[in-house]
Image (cartoon, helix red, strand yellow):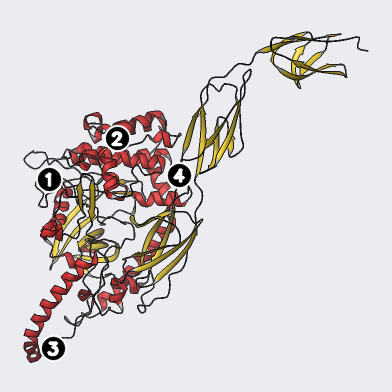
Amino acid sequence: MAEPGANKAGPTPPVGSTAELRLLGAGTQLGRYTLLRRIAAGGMAEVYAARSRGISGFEKKVAIKKILPQHAMNKRFVDMLVDEAKITVSLAHPNIAQIYELGLDDETYYMVMEFVEGRPLNRLLQKVDARGHRTMPLEHAVHIVAETAKGLHHAHVQRDHRGKPLGIVHRDVSPQNVMIAYSGDVKLIDFGIARARGRAAQTTVGTIKGKLRYLAPEIAIGLEPDHRADVFCAGIVLFELLTGEAMFAPRTDVEAIEMASEARVRSPRAQNPDVPRELDDIVMKALARERDDRFQSAKDLHTELRRFLNQYFPAYVGSELGDYMQSLFQAEVEEDRRLDGLAEKVVEKRASEPPPPALADAELPRAEGTKSGGYRELVTRSEIDLVRPVDTSTGGEAAQDPETIHEKVSAGDTAETVAHPPSAPLASLTPRPAPLPPTAERARAPIALMMGIFLFAAGGLFLLRSSDGGPEPAPRPSGAAAAISEPARVRIDISPEVPVRVLIDGELQAHNVTPPVRVRVNVGALTPVAIRIEARGYKPKILEQTLSPGNETVIATALEPERSAVELVGPLSGAKVEADHGRVEGTRITDLEFGQTVHIKVRRPGARDFETNVAVDELGTIRVEIPAAVNVPKGTLYAASRPISEVFVDGRSVGQSPVTLQLPGGSYTVTFKREGLTERRVVKISPNQRIEVLVQGWR
């Protein structure tokens, strides 16, 4: 992994230092809570590890999700946070992360949540992949989805205080929203876009919400979803855990919607032969296109998965998943402890400092679009609104919403208009000036009013131009402001030079590009990102890299070829398989590289040899049907000797003489052995012919 390039924006605190933690808010008070360290940030909100203290030294560690300052006055964002709190606070279940409180401190809305010591499921998948494994142990995969389904069922059946169903549908069941604790607990998180009766932020008819790779068909075509949509998405997650492959891998958002609406699903057993048929049937039922053909509740899905687990792994307990997590994330656990210790030092030092003057304090920037720590992607843009049709020229609320992707879809002509979340206005990243004397302040009032109008118009122009790659306002900010507002540049040199797609923190940055790959990405100062490199025929490569805003980071890496296998099926009793590539394991040829052509020969007793060439043009296991054996006409061999001796044909003992054998046509070596004496004869047998070999008068 290459080191970041030189910092052109001035000195920045070292990664993981007390200075960096302080810069990111450690020690700040929010209501009755003290922020310890930021563990995630996205376009709308950021999440902190925090603690509350009570009487007699009582304290509790919590997670706090709060709206970013630049969005604090956006009613839609506030409504979403309030809705998430109202929905989740009513859900008390061990498989759902608990919400404790919704608070308002000055103008900052925040939500206090259960702190889960662990990592989201998508990070577990990345770690498994980085270790060179295609999938995690099957029992863990089944247990994770079974526990998720149990939490979903609890949400689905919730009622209000009058006994009326709340109609909760999560709509965003994905690996990012399933937390795996180091203890082995599985917890569903992020009900930010959940459907429920009484939401303040209601979804417009025809609007699609959810991650495009995890959409149920009814959501993709704009129908009103019910709890069975979550069952479908849970089926997608289980497929990915069992195969190590994405169910839907679209190149565009429109293609993603088409794939989901048509339910182009695949059997996990077809991708991974180690998946038992009973489990394959469970997954395929969860992935049925028609809702009536699926499991009719998440409870039914949980019951079937538990039945399977009890049958195949009767001694399995959830703590085994915790042991597995700790073995994979040992380094991360130690790093979290180190950062927690540093955060406590920052809190203690900040508590001993006198409060700064009210207007002399510089406003610290908070980066949008950054992700790090145990809640990575907890508050990323999990809501995607695809509105058909939408007219962005009207300037309505939907067109101005920075959290919305607008798709214009019409028959035969598809146009895409994408509104990306803009960066924070540059003016908000600069330090506040020192206060002026009262007379000077009064004198500057008209000027300040005019400047305010000008900055408002300039800010609007900046937002309009930020999504289409237009030039940024000049002059460029310096120092900490430049470190946040200027994109980081990344160059990735990849061997071999094959077309690749590159994702950074799950967002597609380049598709079908031949290395070297150059991308620009908006990140916060000293923010680690996960870079995923994919190429057809090669294993996905995941790199963790800290990028430096305003600078170029050069990364050099090599891809490892993906290995495929050929499985022969058909009448193969007693067959011997030969192949010129790979490794033969019974009736399977493994360790084949993508793009190879393997020559296979099958020898069966009493039958003609079968030969074929198989092009390895897909990943996973390629199944090849072997036709019924074509019998070869046989001849008869009669072998006798005086005195009696043991008879061998081509080195294999066939008994005491005399012997009669039916053999396919060909040449054979017949050997007679007796009391240290040996006599050999070479004979040629033709179909339907009798050959006699006689040896007598041995001395």
How many neighbours does mark 2 have within 10 angstroms: few (below 14), some (14-19), or many (20 or more)? many
Sequence-wise first label, 4 or 3: 4
Residue located beneath label 4 in the image: 134
As shown in the figure, which amino acid type bears the numbered disc 4? Arg
The residue wearing badge 3 is 436
* Mark before the other along the chain sequence, 4 or 1: 4
Q: How many marks?
A: 4
Task: Report the Cα–Cα distance between label 4 and label 2.
Answer: 22 Å
Q: Is residue 66 above or below residue 95?
A: below
Front of the two marks 2 and 1: 1
- Amino acid type of disc 3? Leu
Q: Which mark is first along the chain, 1 or 3?
A: 1
Q: Quadrant of residue 637?
A: top right
Kindly state the secondary structure of the residue where label 1 is placed: loop
Q: At numbered mark 2, what does the secondary structure look like: helix, strand or loop?
A: loop
Q: CA distance from mark 4 to mark 3?
A: 64 Å
Q: How far apart, in angstroms, are the residues tagged by discs 3 and 1?
A: 52 Å
Which label belongs to residue 205? 1
Q: Nearer the viewer, residue 588 or 107?
A: 588
| 516 sits left or right of 111 in the view | right
Q: Is residue 376 left or right of residue 621?
A: left
Q: Which of marks 2 and 4 precedes in the sequence? A: 4
**Alpha carbons under labels 4 and 1: distance apart:** 40 Å
**Point 19% across, 83% down: residue:** 360
Q: Which residue is located at x 31 percent, y 72 percent?
A: 486
Instruction: Assign a secondary structure to mark 3.
Output: loop
For numbered disc 4, what is the local secondary structure?
Answer: loop
**Rendered location of residue 569, percent (x, y):** 50, 26
Q: In the image shown, does 42 or 610 lie closer to the viewer?
A: 610
Res. 68 image quadrant: bottom left
Which residue matches tag 2?
287
